[in-house]
Every structure is written in C-alpha cells, then in structure tokens.
Image (spheres, rainbow, N blue to C red):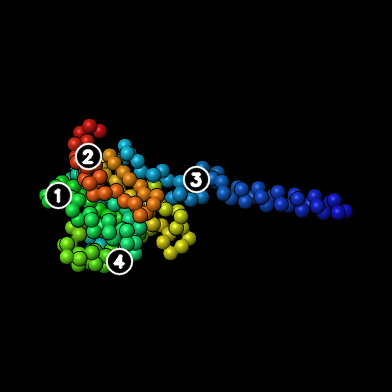
Amino acid sequence: MRILIVAALTLSACVASAGATRALEPDGDGANVSSAATQPRIAVGDVAPAFTLSDETGATVNFPSSRPRTTVLVFYRGSWCPYCARQLSELRGLVKPDESVDLYTISIDPASKSAVLADRIGRDGKGALGFRLLSDPDHRVIDSYGLHDERYDGGEFAGIPRATVAVINASGRVTWVRISEDYKLRPSIAEIRSAIDAASGSATTK
C-alpha cells in the first residue's frame, strides 16, 4: 500500500512539472509568452521601425518624417534618472544650427513629466534643450526596437528601455547604435557626432 501511495505522488509531481514547463514554452502558433523580451535588438543595417509619438507639448511627431533626414534617437530611462538628465543636458550641443538632422529622445514618461524635465534642465543657464522629448507610455516603440529592459518588469519602472543611442541615415537604416547594459555608461557627444557625420553621406550607398 505504501509503495502505491509513493508511486501516485511521484506521478502527480511529474505531471505538475510537465505542465509548468509547457507554460514557459512557446504556444502552438510559435509566439513566445513575452514578445518584448524576445524582440531582436536594433542593430546596424536594420531599417528603423516607423512610429508616431507625442512630444512634451502634446504635438505629434512622425518618424520617418516627410523629408528624408539623418535622425538620432536617444532612448532614456526617465526623468527620475540623474544619468539621463545629465545626458539630455549634454545633447544640447550635438546638432549644429540649420543642420539637416532630427534629434528625438524617447522614454515611457508622460508628456507632463517630460515637460517638467525639459524646463528643469533649461533653467541651468545653458539654454533650452532645443530637441523634443517623446512619450512612449505603453513602451510599444521601445519594444519594437528591442530595447525593453526586462530587469525592471513587475515594478514601478516596468517598460523602461536600456539606455540607447541610434543614428539613422536618410534612407531609414541604422548606421550606428550603442546599447548600454550599464545605465551609468553613455556614449560621448564626440562619438555620436562622428556617427552623425558618417551617416550624412551613407544614405546614397545603401
């Protein structure tokens, strides 16, 4: 009798284990449980996904724009991150006056928080930011670029991106990208500037 009970318990444990394993595996149509976590990261040579987002004033921004231009996308963690605030402050000197380059920064912050951040940085005596802070509250664009930082899922900052800078040429292809696993490390303005200069002549070769 004791042997039969032990065998029954062992069989039940095996069934439960198999069920748990299946729950973590892709379903029948091949879709993963978390598509955001498995979305390929944006890389050099990729066509950058198009998007429509609102900036800190509520105005709509479409990428790509109707006019082919080099574009710099900066994905940052949020207005609460001091490393991000410092990066955005430094970006004021990135794009030259009258240069055919668009610079957009993207976070999950709502427009109201982005507006407060832009105003706070602009009060440091070095002038207004001069570029637009885009809101991606549902992190759909962040996910489409494969930048969703799953390490923060389930908490207050769920959906934030890995700190990333991507340079995209006028043909819509990524020519340079830096994805920071350590949020404290960001590419220098000189590195990004060099990538912009290189991208401005790359569209015709793609």
Identity, as a three-letter code, of the amino acid under mark 2: Ala
Residue of label 1:
96
**Mark 4 to mark 2: distance in Å?**
32 Å
Point out residue 101 in the picture as x, y percentages from the top left corner: 18, 47
> Which mark's residue is nearer the viewer, 3 or 2?
2
| Residue 190 visible in the picture | yes
Please give the label number shown on residue 199: 2
Q: Earlier in the sequence, mark 4 or mark 3?
A: 3
**Tag 4 residue:** 113
- Residue identifier under label 3: 31
- On screen, residue 1 above or below 155: above
Q: Residue at x 22, y 46 (%)?
A: 190
Alpha-carbon distance for marks 3 and 2? 35 Å
Relative horizontal placement of residue 82, taking residue 97 as reference (left or right)? right
Which structural element holds mark 4? helix
Residue type at the position of mark 3:
Ala
Spot occupied by residue 107 in the image (x, y as percentages of width and height): 33, 57
Query: N-terminal of the two: label 3 or label 1?
Result: 3
Give the residue at x 22% y 36%.
202
